[in-house]
Image: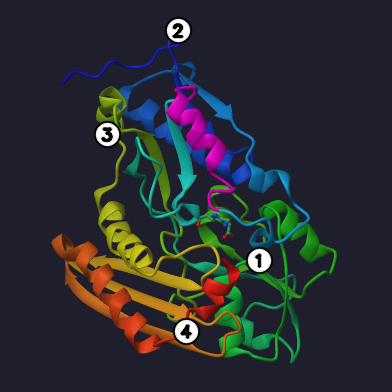
Amino acid sequence: MTVTLPSPDAPLKIGTRGSPLALAQAHETRARLMAAFDLPQDAFRIVVIKVTGDAIQDRPLKEIGGKGLFTREIEEDLIAGRIDIAVHSMKDMPTLQPEGLILDTYLPREDVRDAFVAPVLSALDQLEQGAVVGTSSLRRRAQLLHRRPDLNVVEFRGNVQTRLRKLAEGVADCTFLAAAGLNRLGMENVPATPISPDDMLPAVAQGAIGIERRIADANTAEMLMAVHDIHTGQRLAAERAFLLRLDGSCETPIAGLAQLDGDTLHLRGEVLRPDGSQSISGDRTGTISDAADMGFDLADELLGRAGDGFFDWHARAK
Ligand SMILES: NCc1[nH]cc(CCC(=O)O)c1CC(=O)O
């Protein structure tokens, strides 16, 4: 099949949220497509789409509830043809997409680690007894409380810039941000120390950008193959299968990371109680062709070890 390339007269419309990080990811996608096909910048149009999750800033996400708070409007525009592709942070994406859409193109993954961000301190163990940690991530909250039950975790919503401002205002002693986000925003000046995945296992798909499209749009599928990163795809296949089997929603503290060593895939996963009182983790090693099965298998093991009742808060929250 020959690809019909976009042009300034018929640009490819790239849908994205309007946060600085989302825009940086859309710009990276455009730059990679421009390079792959030797296209000018105006062969693309970046379309900023307002989503519910960004509009409501004063309430915790779990109170607003509902799935797809950051994606629904974008996916509606994609289905309706108002945009041709949508660019997402893969870690914010549900494991299943709406009918007619597919999310199987991934750009090369950035740093997967979480970073410890504090004006003065450089590591978690330097925090005083009872120190205040700002985060809106259930996973980070549970992982921190598991290690340091004395910490005082407070809700910290908003985009990266908002959280850094709150930190500067002294609302919390420290916060945690994905290193990938800081790198993509070029924020080298932020006092951030990356944490080894051995100490804090990242969210499934952290650091990966995904590009969603209409299944029926064969031309776009062909184009996107030129920017897809196979290794990221193999790692996310394992991680997202793990998440799918656990029925991961935004209400469940889950962590997962797959790493490649040649053709060998190593997957680690963790589930926690939201209050940090229990953490259950495990790992699998296999070949890349078994990626999804490794994810399902590890999830089954952790579910079995967790036993009845472990996920009860999840049922209650629904
Ligand atoms: N939930 C917000 C979100 N979604 C993706 C990233 C960072 C970039 C990435 O992981 O790809 C962030 C911010 C953060 O966790 O600090």
Tell me what residue is drawn at x 38 percent, y 19 percent: 39
Distance from label 2 to label 1 (Cα)?
43 Å
Tell me what residue is drawn at x 54 percent, y 26 percent: 46
Range of residues picked out in magenta: 67-83
Q: Amino acid at mark 2?
A: Asp
Secondary structure type for disc 1? loop
Distance from label 1 to label 4 (Cα)?
21 Å
Is there any visible trace of residue 27 in the rendered image? no
Distance from label 2 to label 4 (Cα)?
56 Å
Q: Which mark is residue 9?
A: 2
Answer above or below: position of 96 versus 139: above
Distance from label 1 to label 3 (Cα)?
36 Å
**Category of crowding for the residue at label 2, using alpha-carbon neighbours closer than 10 angstroms: few (below 14), some (14–19), many (at least 20):** few
- Mark 1 / mark 4, whichever is N-terminal: 1
Distance from label 2 to label 3 (Cα)?
22 Å
Q: Amino acid at mark 1?
A: Ser
Answer above or below: position of 96 versus 137: above
Q: Which residue is mark 1?
A: 136
- Mark 1 / mark 3, whichever is N-terminal: 1
Q: Amino acid at mark 4?
A: Phe
The image position of residue 12, as x and y in percent, is 43, 21
- Mark 2 / mark 1, whichever is N-terminal: 2
Q: Are marks 4 and 3 in contact (CB under 8 Å)?
A: no
* Quarter of the image where ligand 1 sits: bottom right
78 part of magenta stretch: yes
Secondary structure type for disc 3? loop
Give the foreground label among 2 and 1: 1
Q: Which residue is mark 4?
A: 310
The image position of residue 85, as x and y in percent, is 42, 31
- Mark 2 / mark 3, whichever is N-terminal: 2
Which one is nearer the viewer's eye here, 14 or 72? 72
